[in-house]
Image (tube, rainbow, N blue to C red):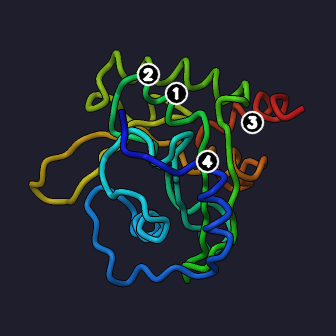
Amino acid sequence: MYNICMKIEEAYNKIKKFSTLNTEHEHINNKGSMGHVLEKALGLNLNSNLMDFEDGELKTFHYNERNEVKEDFRITSRWNLDEIKMKLEQLLVVGANLNNQIEFMKIVRPLENIFFLEQLEIEVPFIIEKGPMNCSQADTNVFIAKTQGRGGGAPKERSLYISRPWAHALFHGVYPKRARKGKHLVAEFELSLK
């Protein structure tokens, strides 16, 4: 169905050889520049297929000055629960510091964590039913609908994100100390790690 010919483990082993990513000349509308550079380096087709690899997705993020995930973590702009679950089954996550030096790389399976699975099954159907454009980020705790696109009068669409502190917790197993988004769920999250 998709023109994908690389498995996530193969991509992981190739990316291990990189230390710094040059994103200076990358200007992409629907992807982060770091993800675009990695897709090109891996020889992936730069398209909007549902999945980047035969068995997973490539996702990137930057750290802030406190060494926490800097921004909300974009998942998809497709609002179909089955497709969202497919995207979240297996992620190759690459994190870089503010100088684009790779500091984190891990294959993450969010739906194997009962906390993230339960939150997905509560929050995403709620967003879909209410309508992504009708949801505020205050309506949900972990998974959020957030406007993606340029400012001004450009057309807007909502994408599904994992909120910044919960993305950090997913990747590092620790909810950031200064974060507030969904903080009342931290004890439940910590139980899911045992």
Q: Nearer the viewer, residue 158 or 187?
A: 158
Q: Which residue is label 2 attached to?
A: 81
Mark 4 or mark 2: which is in front? 2
Give the secondary structure at mark 1: helix
47 relative to 194 in the view: left or right: left
The span from disc 1 to disc 2 (Cα, nearest Å) is 6 Å
- Residue labelled with disc 1: 85
Res 184 → quadrant: top right
Residue found at x 44% / y 18%: 125
- Cα distance between the residues tagged 4 and 1: 16 Å
Instruction: Locate the C terminus and report the quarter of the image it occupies.
Output: top right
Question: What residue did someone put label 4 on?
Answer: 167
Lower sequence index among marks 4 and 1: 1
Q: CA distance from mark 2 to mark 3?
A: 25 Å
Which of pointers 2 and 3 lies earlier in the amino acid sequence? 2
Q: Quadrant of the N terminus?
A: top left
Q: Secondary structure at mark 2?
A: helix
State whether residue 194 is above or below residue 3. above
Given this view, does label 3 or label 1 mark the residue nearer the observer? 1
Q: Amino acid at mark 3?
A: Val
